Amino acid sequence: MIGVGGSDWKHYVRRKPHVVKRRIRKGIPDCLRGLVWQLISGSRDLLLMNPGVYEQLVIYETSASELDIIRDISRTFPSHVFFQQRHGPGQRSLYNVLKAYSVYDRDVGYVQGMGFVAGLLLLYMSEEDAFWLLVALLKGAVHAPMEGLYLVGLPLVQQYLFQFDNLVREQVPKLGEHFTQEMINPSMYASQWFITVFSYSFPFHLALRIWDVFLFEGVKIVFKVGLALLKFCQDDLVTKRLEQLKEEHEKKNGKVIQSARGSVEQNHQLQ
């Protein structure tokens, strides 16, 4: 399907899009994940069309966000062996990618949630490849641009949360009514889902499967996964009051984050 260095990919996708979709949903082989992510996102084309640009952004440009990026680096997957060492290769790569993007798109600059997205990408590709994939996502190389997730006021996050709230009321009405009674809105639990595309607190193996499909099919996958989670937990959620849900969210979120970080470490060591 891919060919040598991706040479057959576009031809295959045009001829058999349904086969590609089905196989991606089954899961991209881990050894091919980095390359396939670049192909399905359109970032490989951006890389080839912009030789030397990443190096220019990293070495010769300055960013107003540099101090913010440095401050947040240690908070991004802090237990992961690749990012754990202070000023180590992982932290340097993450800094370079985030700094380069903050210069490339000064309207967006840098927002904290971007670190988890860039960090996930760096586990499967080089700095330059990760940078151009971030550009492809935010500027909309294949799907709708997602830079509004990080602009001042987070306008796209607000739009997605409004749409998600309506979907919950429509597709999970019993839970939607309960949330209304308890004055629970999606901004209280789903903002990170959209800002980091589940890379922040989900178990690593699950986040990867979501990203496989997300990069090929777009942001609708975030909505689908979010709704599936609520449907799965509906019977439990409708019995809880707001304060109970807050307490359980904090407790479970801590456990999930630890699980995710542990899974990331294990995966990196196996590689």
Image: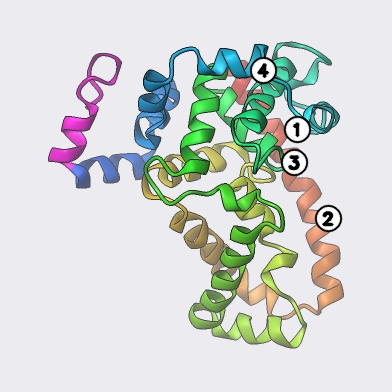
Of marks 1 and 4, the one in the foreground: 4
- Residue bearing the label numbered 2: 251
Q: Tell me the number on the disc at residue 112.
A: 3
Hey, which quadrant is residue 40 in on the image? top left
- Find the magenta span and give its range: 1-16
Q: Could you tell me how far apart the alpha carbons at marks 1 and 2 are, in whole angstroms? A: 20 Å
Q: CA distance from mark 2 to mark 3?
A: 23 Å
Residue 34, compared with residue 169, is above or below; it is above
Of callouts 2 and 4, which one flags the residue occurring earlier in the amino acid sequence? 4
**SS class of the residue under badge 4?**
helix
Residue 5 position within the rendered picture, expressed as x and y whole percent measured from the top left: 30, 15
194 relative to 28 in the view: left or right: right
Q: Could you tell which of marks 1 and 4 lies nearer the N-terminus?
A: 1
Q: Is residue 11 magenta?
A: yes
Residue 93: assigned label: 4
- In the rendered image, residue 248 lying in the magenta stretch gets the answer no
In front of the other: 92 or 109: 109
